[in-house]
Amino acid sequence: MRMNKNDLNTGISGQGGPTRRVSMPDIFGGADKKTRPASATINKPREELFSFFRDFTNFPKFMKHVTRVENIDAKTHRWTIQDKGGALKHWETEIIEERPGEMIAWKTKPDSVFKQTAAVIFEPAVGGRGTIVSLKVAFDTTLGKIAGQLERVGLADPDAEAAMNVRRFKALLETGEVPTIDGQPNGAEGEAKEGNVA
C-alpha cells in the first residue's frame, strides 16, 4: 500500500543519527483533510506500547466511550459503545495494515453502522526518552444520519476524541491508571484537543 509521508511529518533524530520515519498509512481518503493526528510522548519502550495497543480488548481501559472490544479473529474485532440514552451500538473493524512495533491501521467492515478509519504509529522519541504515539481517527459523515448517531455516542469530534484517548493511554501506561474527572465542573478531559502531549 502506498505510504503518504506528508500525512504526519514527524521525522526525528537521535544521538546516533537520524531514525527511520514512521508514516501514517495512506488510507484516509477525503477525510484525511478534515482530521488531524493527536500525539503524546510516553515514557515507555515502543515495543511495550505497541504490544498493549495491538490487543484491541485493552481499548476500553483507556478509550472513554468504548464499552467492550471482542476478538473475532486475529484481525477482526467487534466493538460495543453505549450511547447517551444507554443503548448499545456495535460495529466490526478489520486491521488493514500493520508494521510490528511501528503502526496499526484499521477500518470498519462494509456493513458496519459507522464508517471509521483509524491508525496509530509509534516512533522513538529524541534521545531515547520514550516513544511518540500518534493516533488519527476519521468517520465518514456523508452517509445521511451518521453525524447525528456519532453525536449520540459522544464521537462527534474525532480529533478531540483521539486527543483524549491518547492522554488516557499515556496515563494508563505510565501510572497504571486513568485519572477520573467525571463530575469536575471544568470538564478538563473533554477539552482535549489535537496536538502533542509531553
Image (tube, rainbow, N blue to C red):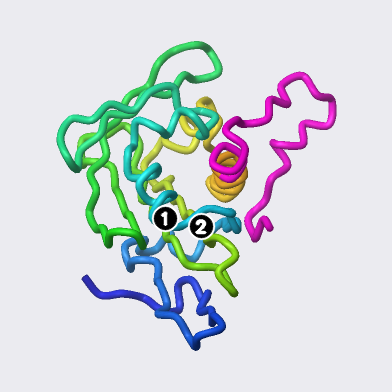
Above-or-below relation of 154 to 159: above
Q: Quadrant of residue 141?
A: top left
Nearest the viewer among 75 and 147 is 75
- Determine which of the numbered discs, if any, sits on residue 133 in the image: 2
State the residue at coordinates (48%, 33%).
150
Residue 114, percent across and down? 35, 36
State the residue at coordinates (57%, 56%).
38
Nearest the viewer among 134 and 16 is 16
Q: Earlier in the sequence, mark 1 or mark 2?
A: 1
Taking the magenta stretch, the answer to whether it contains residue 173 is yes
**How far separated are the C-alphas under marks 1 and 2?**
7 Å
Q: Secondary structure at mark 2?
A: strand
Q: Outermost residue, left direction? A: 73
Q: Which residues are magenta?
A: 170-198
Above-or-below relation of 178 to 32: above
State the residue at coordinates (26%, 58%).
98
Residue 125, percent across and down? 56, 68
Q: Outermost residue, top direction? A: 86
Q: Are marks 1 and 2 in contact (CB under 8 Å)?
A: yes
Q: Secondary structure at mark 1?
A: strand
Q: Is residue 68 left or right of residue 71?
A: right
Which residue in the protein does label 1 denote? Answer: 120
State the residue at coordinates (49%, 68%).
124
